[in-house]
Amino acid sequence: MQKILKIIKLLEKDYPINFYSGKNPFNVLISTILSQRTRDENTLNASNKLFSKFPTAKKIANADISKIKKLIKESGFYNVKAKRIKEVSRILLEKYNGKVPNELDKLLKLPGVGRKTANCVLVYGFNIPAIPADTHVHRISNRIGIVKTKTPEQTEYELMKKVPKKYWVNINELFVKQGQTICNPIKPKCNKCSIRKLCDFSKKLPKNI
């Protein structure tokens, strides 16, 4: 536990946590669905276009699907995603009065919502402790040596055991930023990494790298 706490403290200095400002849970949910299998900039552009025209569950549920597809085209797989977010919006209207539930089990019952998406909604939409284990969190946790897992879901469960709950909401944000800037999948910038001395992967590299 001491190792992960040291890592969190060091990364917090590199990437100050300021992400939670009462974000709209519905926007978080739909944006996270749109983010599947695409780049962050594509998600942002598609989300902004969609919400500028259809900002609520009711508006998306009642929107012509061809218009939704056109707005979210940048996110990729837009035919599938358009049907999915329209169906999710319909369910939210019928079961939850257009509101996004703040319980993991209820979120997981929504079409296209897996554990990562559900946990993102809890963390970024409600500030509820959870660990969204995306590819960055999974890769970095294993690379550093905090866990030895084969899937993001296994990583989530292991991190929940090893990380104090008060730090759960920070893990995804810190590791995503670290993965985007320093700990790349290929050719990580170990010479610029603030947690290099705590990383198992870095210890295996020649000292001059």
Image: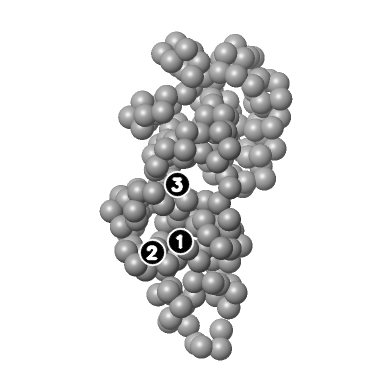
Measure the alpha-carbon separation of dots 2 and 1.
6 Å
Q: Residues within 10 Å of mark 2 (few under 14, many from 20)?
A: some
Quadrant occupied by the N terminus: bottom left
Horizontal and vertical percent position of residue 66: 66, 20
Which residue is labeled 1 in the image?
A: 8
Q: Secondary structure at mark 2?
A: helix
Q: Residues within 10 Å of mark 3 (few under 14, many from 20)?
A: many
Q: Secondary structure at mark 3?
A: helix
CB atoms at circles 2 and 1 under 8 Å apart? yes
**Is residue 178 visible to the viewer in this orientation of the structure?**
no
Residue type beneath disc 1: Ile
Which residue is labeled 2 in the image?
A: 4
Which residue is labeled 3 in the image?
A: 169
Residue type beneath disc 2: Ile
Which residue occupies 45% across, 61% down? Answer: 8
Which residue occupies 51% across, 25% down? Answer: 84
Measure the alpha-carbon separation of dots 3 and 2.
14 Å
Which residue occupies 47% across, 51% down? Answer: 170
Measure the alpha-carbon separation of dots 1 and 3.
11 Å
Residue type beneath disc 3: Val
